[in-house]
Image (cartoon, grey):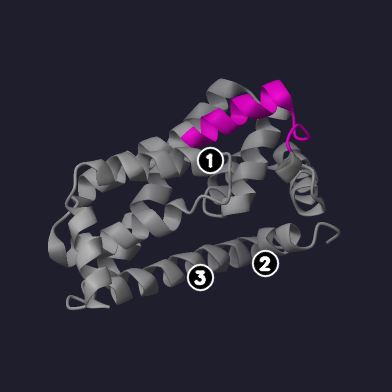
Amino acid sequence: MQAINDFILAAAGQPWVLLLVLACCVIDGFFPPIPSESVVVGLAAVAATADVPNPWLLMAVAGLGAFSGDNIAYLIGRRVGTHRWHWMRGPRMQGAFRWAGDELRKRPASLILVARFIPIGRVAVNLTAGVTHYPHLRFVGLTVLSATLWASYSVGIGLFFGQWFENNHLLGAAIAIVCAVGLGIAVDLVINRIRGKVPVVERLTDPEA
């Protein structure tokens, strides 16, 4: 355990770790298996007590990466659609695409903002926005806001929990990541309960919902 903690601390202090954050956040915008939340939240938890990486710089890089990834996904959707690659054609993703298309016609602004906090949801929404030719300038404006909120939220969660586990950075990072995921699901449930809709998470789990 101490060896793992030492590795996390060593990596957190390296200049290239921010390039890793940027790459993960960009790719996660259009390829859901890349875990950008865990990278950002985990490093923020370390930063709470180790002072590296700089939390403000981490937030800025994460926000830039999230914004870039979301807009790359939009352009991919506009150019290649939602059936080009194998991972897009599964029932789960196709169900997410259908749901995203319906919701974009009804409430595009709130959908784009909320979907940023749900890994598969944001990919489906970003690609579908491109496919349906949702106005790009408006999409850019909304993703500036959503990326800023997401980066602030992710770093904030990591800093908050990281302060509780000064002697075990790995445990602090792990708990912060679990709480970030849990809060994201909770936000989705609350918003959809207010609207009387089936939650995004349930939609993505069961495309026939």
Residues marked 2 and 1 touching at CB (< 8 Å): no
Q: How far apart are the two marked residues, 2 and 1, measured between alpha carbons?
A: 26 Å
The structure residue drawn at horizontal position 37% and vertical position 35%, both measured from the top left corner, is 64
Say which label, 3 or 1, has the lower sequence index: 1
Nearest to the observer: residue 20 or residue 190: 20
Residue highlighted by disc 2? 193
Q: Name which residue type carries label 1.
A: Gly
- Residue 178 placed where, x, y %? 45, 71
Category of crowding for the residue at label 2, using alpha-carbon neighbours closer than 10 angstroms: few (below 14), some (14–19), many (at least 20): few
In the image: residue 52, left or right of residue 44: left
The structure residue drawn at horizontal position 48% and vertical position 30%, both measured from the top left corner, is 141
Q: How far apart are the two marked residues, 3 and 1, measured between alpha carbons?
A: 20 Å
Residue highlighted by disc 3? 182
**Relative vertical location of residue 65 with respect to residue 183 in this rendering, above or below:** above
Q: Quadrant of residue 8?
A: bottom left
- Residue 169 placed where, x, y %? 24, 71
Q: Quadrant of residue 166?
A: bottom left
Q: Name which residue type carries label 2.
A: Arg
Q: Is residue 140 magenta?
A: no
- Residue 186 placed where, x, y %? 55, 69
Residue highlighted by disc 1? 29
Q: Is residue 82 magenta?
A: yes
| Disc 2, SS | helix
Q: Which residues are magenta?
A: 69-85
The structure residue drawn at horizontal position 68% and vertical position 58%, both measured from the top left corner, is 200
| Disc 1, SS | loop
